[in-house]
Image: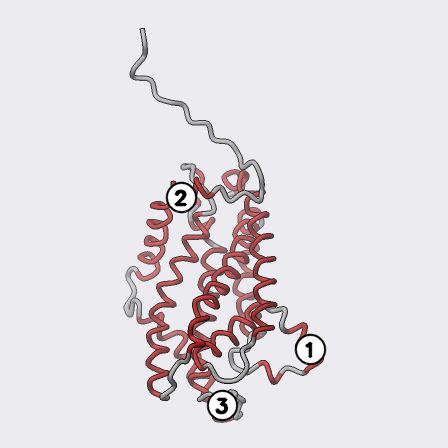
Amino acid sequence: MHNTGATAAVIIRGAKSSWSLEPRELWQHRELLYFLAWRDIKVRYKQTVLGLAWVVIQPLAIALSLSLFLGRLVKGSSEGLPYPLFAYSAMVIWQLFANAFTDSSNSLLANERLITKVYFPRLLVPLSAVLASLLDFSISLLVLALFLGYYRITPTLAIAILPLVVLLAVLIALGVGLWLAALNVKYRDVRYTIGFLAQFWFLATPIAYPTSVVPDRWRVWYGLNPLVGVVEGFRWALRGAGAAPLSLLAVSACVAVAILMSGLYYFRRTEDTFADFI
């Protein structure tokens, strides 16, 4: 007799290689990725007074503060751009990076119950946090378009590289997020360094000032900050005037690949122990 009511056994094994992405498995769980990202968006704005307005208020408030103290009082350089546009355009791409890497860094601990009870590719958790940040960025981008219209700046063909710059920012955020998310599971004090790292990175990125104010002897080392090329490339893509920051973008791309690949390796190497430590 055949037991027609028997169920097939599912054997779960660890990844064959720490470098393996297992795209087939990620594709099979694509709906879970969508629901995780959508859940992150709903949780972020649930029971808030202003809701999605915070997406605009936060970078706009910082940009206006920089405009008041640096643009008017200190007369900071803005390389020919109106200082409010100079600051806000940098804040838009910075906010995308900051939200993506902060949320992805805390994503595993935020999904503790899900990780300890259900099997799925753990990479989906930080990836969903990064994808959720793109909604905020899209709204801020609309406000930035209003800024361009107000100052009568018409984008040129340089705008075509804008998606590549945004992709670069997302990859850097994901790479840093993978590192910190995996470390955060095992070492709980890592969470306290995330806010400090974001503040330090903000000051080390040309948001309130252009790269031209950095002394020449430090500019090579300064360019190793991958967000330098991202911010300068983002501004240039909107304006299209002057020389393209190709060298900065090339350095940013190389550093971004190094951060992403190393973060992916460490994440995949340690993900089998997440349920034990979390």
How many neighbours does mark 1 have within 10 angstroms: few (below 14), some (14-19), or many (20 or more)?
Answer: few
| Callout 1 touching callout 2 (CB < 8 Å) | no
Return the x and y of residue 12 as percentages of the image width and height. Answer: 47, 31
Of residue 107 and residue 235, the one placed in the foreground of this image is 235
- Report how far apart the C-alphas of labels 3 and 1 lie in the structure: 23 Å
| Callout 3 touching callout 2 (CB < 8 Å) | no
Of residue 93 and residue 243, the one placed in the foreground of this image is 243
Q: Earlier in the sequence, mark 3 or mark 1?
A: 3
Q: Which mark is residue 27?
A: 2
Q: Earlier in the sequence, mark 3 or mark 2?
A: 2
| Callout 3 touching callout 1 (CB < 8 Å) | no
Of residue 7 and residue 47, the one placed in the foreground of this image is 7
Q: Which mark is residue 218?
A: 1
How many neighbours does mark 2 have within 10 angstroms: few (below 14), some (14-19), or many (20 or more)?
Answer: few
Return the x and y of residue 268 as percentages of the image width and height. Answer: 55, 44
Q: Residue at x 57, y 52 (%)?
A: 263
Three-letter amino acid code at disc 2?
Trp
Q: Residue at x 29, y 17 (%)?
A: 5
Location of the N terminus by quadrant is top left
- Report how far apart the C-alphas of labels 3 and 2 lie in the structure: 46 Å
Return the x and y of residue 175 as percentages of the image width and height. Answer: 54, 56
Q: Is residue 28 left or right of residue 186?
A: left
Three-letter amino acid code at disc 1?
Trp
- Report how far apart the C-alphas of labels 1 and 2 lie in the structure: 44 Å
Q: Is residue 231 above or below residue 119?
A: below
Q: Is residue 226 above or below residue 21?
A: below
Which SS class for mark 3?
loop
